[in-house]
Amino acid sequence: MTSGPGAPGLRPARIARLLARARIVLYVGLVGFVLYFQWRYDLTRLPPGGVSPLTDIQPGHRLVVDMHFRAPEPGAAVLYRGRGERLLLGRVSDPPESLAPEEAARCRDDARWIVKEVAEAAGEDSMLLGPISLERIVGRVVIVLPF
């Protein structure tokens, strides 16, 4: 292999051009990621006072909420609209066996049974509202930040 000024390979000028292109690709990718994250997710904070309706999420915690989610499965923590468009936190659950068959079928298709795990927490859940339509579910909690 020959070396010298006319030999093919990576010369300092070519290395500098490659690094400049790599930086541009990195910046474009980072900006794209930030824009996607802002479109898809929302950062919400629970009020610091009061009682959380879920045992594993405490008042004052921050929630990363997926705003463009598929229909949530049982066990998922979700934000949903209650009466008067009030934003509430609850957990998707399997419908109770005592539920009428047509309502249970609705929970599999276009609605979910959402419960609060702490009875003292304010707000209504499916025990009062019945199955909650997917249109009323605002987002699915994907990360809980304890600060």
Image (cartoon, helix red, strand yellow):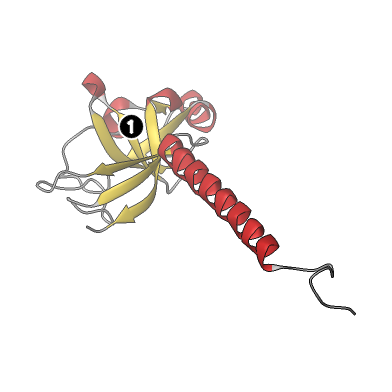
| Depicted 33 relative to depicted 20: above or below | above
Identify whether 77 is placed above or below 144. above
Q: Quadrant of residue 65?
A: top left
Q: Can see residue 73?
A: no
Residue for badge 1: 80
As rendered, which of 12 and 134 lies closer to the eye? 12
Between 33 and 56, the one nearer to me in the picture: 33
Percent coordinates x, y for residue 70 in the rendering? 52, 36
* Left or right, residue 143 beside residue 49: right
Relative image position of residue 62 (x, y in whole percent)? 26, 50
Can residue 71 be seen here? The reply is yes
- Position of the N terminus by quadrant: bottom right
* Label tally: 1
Q: Is residue 102 above or below residue 19?
A: above
**Residue at x 62% of width, y 61% of height:** 16
- Type of amino acid at the residue the image marks with label 1: Tyr
Q: Secondary structure at mark 1?
A: strand
User: Residue at 29% of width from left, 33% of height from top?
Assistant: 127
